[in-house]
Image: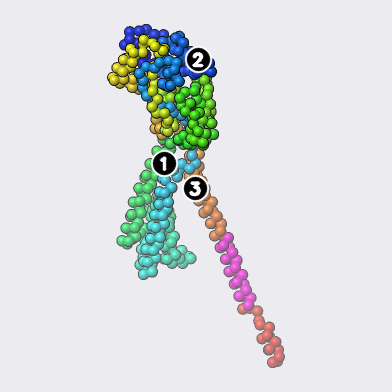
Amino acid sequence: MAELFPVLMAYLDRCYVWVVPEPRVYGYKLPNGSWEGVIGLVARGEADLSVPLSITTERLAAVDFTEPVFIDEFAIAYKLPSLKSDIRGFIKPFSPVLWLLMLFAAIIVCVSTWFVLRSYAAHGTRLMKDRKRRDSRGDNARERAVERSLLWTMCHLINQPSCVISSPSPAVPWEPTGYAPRILGGLWLLVAFILGVVYRGNLKAMLILPTLELPFNNLQELADSDEVIWSPGSHIAHQLLMAAPPDSLYGSLAKKTFVELNIPAGIQRTYQGKHAVITLMSAIIASSHDTFSKTGNCKIFVLPERFLRTTSMGILTGKGSNLKPKLDKAIKWIKEFGITEQLIRNKFSNGTNCVKPPTSNTGSQGLRALDIVDFFGVFVIYISGILLSGGVFVAEVIVKKMDSRDHRGTGSSSRELRGKPKRDDTLAESARE
């Protein structure tokens, strides 16, 4: 919130110079009771003011705070996962329940069609207009009903043009006639058309703008994961975690948390996915804004679950400083006119977009070229069908050869029995002679 100081200093009619502390941290208390960082500069009188920091009881013992400038919250951020190809992508446009309902509906239509065909065939009624005569095997109408109903139902469900009778080589060379088959077929064609259009539209949308699979979505999943958490200083959130019971959720997070005061290195490791970070939301927004302005991408995501939502942020002043009453008056005036919120929106517009839910902030990462892996699932289905049909074909050839061999063997035995004279008859004729 350094952008707030030009407004405040103009109101106070003061000039100002920025001072950078060493080490470059907000501040932490040493064992001897003194402070380092920004808080140490103000406490020792080396600086008159500081950027807004969270107001805590421990800090109030060393410095004074002005009227809260804004309310912040602590959050946990982690590296935003990259978009990857998914071999199961072709089944994701529909939920498992909808796939089961489609299968159930196809079975019902297939069985209903078979019953209708069988019923009409039993009464000698011709329901279908065949363009081909019956094959040499002499299949009757009842046997053909099963094949016709199955092929007709599935071909129209998967939108196969070869199933249509008007195509050059139709898989099902007939079309329904009669009131009952036409009503049933029309309803099924309408359902299959709607499902096909919705499936293709959803599949295209998921391939163009896929959703991200986050490593964790809440604090419990983070506690159960193997990721460690970086705390840039012993702030109030870190103190809360350390004071939590070991068997609680916060206690589990405390076991995974470590403190590191090297802020630039910690930010770099967070972007690399080596650890998560627990810090103020304003700090996450500022860092995300800088990164997005340089790269055009959001590098981290923020857990939806927060804690310490009411963290007051105030400007530090020295103990008993005469600047505090004037600053309190100016800050109240700024907040009443909404200047604080306007400054945040203007300064960190990109960062504000990056901390939105990951499904809506993928930015340019949401568009990607299709990979060969995206088609593996469909290829597997086709290859499986080819292998299955090939196996069935081989089995039919083997069974046919075995039947032909048995038929030839039976015919040869019959001919031998008919051509060979019986031994008993020959002996009887010899005895009579």
> Is 251 or 378 nearer to us in this picture?
251
Look at the numbered disc 2 and give the secondary structure of its residue. Answer: loop
Q: Is residue 29 magenta?
A: no
Inter-mark Cα distance, 1 to 3: 16 Å
Disc 1 or disc 3, which is closer to the eye? 1
Count of numbered circles on the image: 3
Q: Where is mark 3, residue-wise?
A: 381
Q: Amino acid at mark 3?
A: Ile
Q: Is residue 10 above or below residue 342?
A: above
On residue 34, which mark appears? 2
Q: Which residues are magenta?
A: 398-417
Disc 2 or disc 1, which is closer to the eye? 2
Q: Is residue 323 visible?
A: yes
Inter-mark Cα distance, 3 to 2: 70 Å
Q: Is residue 339 above or below residue 172?
A: above
Q: Quadrant of the C terminus?
A: bottom right
Residue 213 x, y percent position in the rendering? 46, 36
Considering only order in the chain, which callout, 1 or 2, is on the residue closer to the N terminus?
2
Q: Where is mark 1, residue-wise?
A: 203
